[in-house]
Image: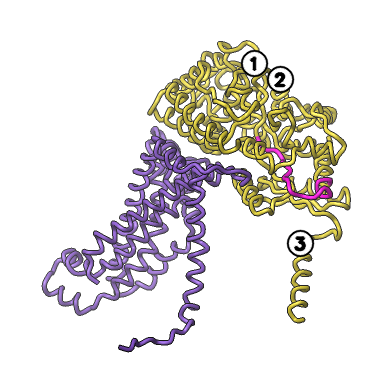
Chain colours: A yellow, B purple
Amino acid sequence: MKFKSLMTSALLGASLVLTPSAWGATEIQWWHAMEGALGETVNKIAKDFNASQSEYQLTPVYKGGYEDTMTAGIAAFRAKQQPHIIQIFDAGAATIINAKGAVYPVQDLLSKHGVGFDANNYISGVRSFYADSTGKMVGMPFNSSTPVMYYNKNAFQKAGLTLPPATWEDFEMRVAPALKAAGYVPMAQSHSPWIFSENFHSRHNLPMATNNNGFGGLETKILYNNPAMVTHWSKMKQWQDQGFYKYYGRAWGDNQAAFVNEEVAIWFGSSGSFGGLKNSAKFPFGTTYLPYWHGVTSKPTNTFIGGAALFTMSGHSDAEYKGVAKFFEFLTKPDVQFFWHRETGYVAITNAAYELAQREGYYKENPDAEVGILQLNLPGGEHSKGYQLGFYVQVREVMYEEYDKLFSGKQDAKTALANIEEGANKLLVKFARTYK
Amino acid sequence: MKRVTFSHSPIPYLFVLPQIAIIAVFFLWPSAEAIRLSFFLEDPWGLSNEFVWFENYQTIFEDPEYVGTLIATLIFSLSVTFLSLGLAMLLAVQVDGLLRGGGTYRPLITWAYAIAPAVAGLVARFLFSPQIGPIYAWLNPEGQPPWFEPNLDSIDAWVVVTSGAVWRQVSVNFIYLLAGLQSIPRAVLEASRIDNPSGLGRFWSVTFPLLAPTLFFLMVINFSYAFFETFAIIDTVFPFGPPSGAASLVYKVYVDGFKGADLGGSSAQSVVLMLFVLALTVVQFRYLEKKIHY
């Protein structure tokens, strides 16, 4: 008797803990990796969604960085405790998209439980990145950014320059010598795999891997050791020796700080860095597209996105999926997307939201905030839709390792790229066997 | 003949049970799981797996970087052990020799013990940061090309990680060594003072041998600390990864398993690491412990 009443009260207590507010509302768990101000914005979106309806209660949970969030999701799935929605970043996309039993593709979800799905509503740069080999959209793009070039206008003025370099030839011949003479380090960059390898291929419409950049299936080989990359990275090393480029190490912030401190005149970062730069840089700066090699192409193409997407995990009830679909519809509403874009600097992912931002005159006041979207919307090519490669976190690790050795003078660009290909292809073979 | 048996009470077993439970849950079970996973190619979600015998191990030893990492880790662990023991010994001897003021120094030297390795890493990161680090600025005077670049050079990176690891570990060693020094009978020390007027000579011929059991214990502890616990220091000093050549074995286990979701490869690495440290510990007990008199 006593035991039974104890059990009942324990169960009651547990249920009180588990349903946070709104009695009777279906709870939706959303695990994300957005910290600080970004996390605040996520909470605000969740709060607005909860206020907009009464059937569902969305609970955002911060799980640490991108990798931590993915690991937490994997562990939770193995323990059958997975959340409804999880944020997974670009390099981890293949890990979840190929886990057929673990994820509920957003396209199916919206077709079955929502108002339907039309890929053409999304801006072209984000449309295909989180799709599977059949072209079905698996993840809902969430925080999307793209690499852009920032330049210090004071430095350019001091060096007697007006226009930023449009091509790498222009950088080498005109811009870098003038900036160096004016006492600046001409260039730094914050992510050699993302900006100067992955998006390098996209900007020049070169394949970065076989099998349609890995979208076609798992039997994929990486193609980094190509003449354009060898030229580019040999030049990078040459520029480092000439004092046209400085490598501040792998850490994103160390390279950005050198730009903010006005030591470096041109910095390659993310379109999402705009908000932070606006607060920290004490000088007028401009934003423009990534340069391209005129010797490689005369028709440069779009870059693709980086960042992360929201994936729906399998193993929940239809009633809960209805709530997830409702939330995704809310999230892609033009005003919500515009709010997200304005607050964070990430691009708006739907055409309607982009048009809203234009109508409101947002880009008249902040022309720099539009550069990312414009670059994503540039005419695309066969190879500029993105990539989907397994164990890509480790592939990037190999790249960092080999580029480090290049910049410390231990090897030349050709060796570095050959090593990257060898290491990456071993990982891809292993991934294909793991997920077959 | 009648065998004498005592009636066993189960109570002693109950007393050791919590300890055994802790070892089982936090060591034996995960180790068994690591050994099992190291023979499989398994997708992280646990949807499918394939038994592959020793393939994951083969992959490790075919990697040309792995042997380099192993040697670097060994050098790092030896440096951490000897530097933190040496510094702690110096401090303990100095504090032990004080007639007054020991009570002030002891807590000052000890309190870094309360610091988690990750926090020690953060402190090292700020001290050596190219933007705001006072030690970085002091080592690289303005107007000259910098020569100490932990973000770029693997040896400089190891220096930063080692100093973070040593700083935290010195205080642990200090506590034990000071206790060891204070338990040496005063009569022995006074007798030696008559025989040998040289302080350093007395230290090596009398104090050091009497401290040897404590030192041996600390050496084993420090070695496993340097091998297993320092990945947090590397991860906090270099959140984007250390420069090429400055990763340790346990950091690679962490990166491949937790960041890269490669369960089989990461498990095989951790089994190799376990065996390696086990072998080192056996060597320590076999050869060094024989020279120690308790």
Q: Is residue B193 above or below residue A129?
A: below
What's under tag 3, amino acid-wise?
Answer: Leu
Nearest the viewer among A4 and A386 is: A4
- Report, in whole angstroms, how far the alpha carbon at label 1 lies from the one at label 3: 53 Å
Q: Are marks 1 and 2 in contact (CB under 8 Å)?
A: yes
Per the image, the residue denoted by label 3 is A18
Work out whether mark 1 precedes mark 2 in sequence or the reverse, and give the earlier one. Answer: 1
The label on residue A378 is 2
- Report, in whole angstroms, how far the alpha carbon at label 2 lies from the one at label 3: 48 Å
Question: In the image, what residue occupies the spot 60% across and 30% down?
Answer: A218
SS for callout 2: loop
Q: Is residue A168 left or right of residue B233?
A: right
Residue A172, position in %: x, y? Answer: 52, 16
**Could you tell me which quadrant the N terminus of chain B lies in?**
bottom left
- The part of the chain drawn in magenta is A307-322
Q: Chain of mark 1?
A: A
Question: In the image, what residue occupies the spot 31% across and 66% down?
Answer: B92
Q: Quadrant of residue A314?
A: top right
The label nearer to you, 2 versus 3, is 3
Residue A227, position in %: x, y? Answer: 50, 16
Q: Residue A58 magenta-drawn?
A: no
What's under tag 2, amino acid-wise?
Answer: Leu
What's under tag 1, amino acid-wise?
Answer: Pro
Question: In the image, what residue occupies the spot 72% across and 27% down?
Answer: A373
Per the image, the residue denoted by label 1 is A300
Q: Quadrant of residue A128?
A: top right
SS for callout 3: helix
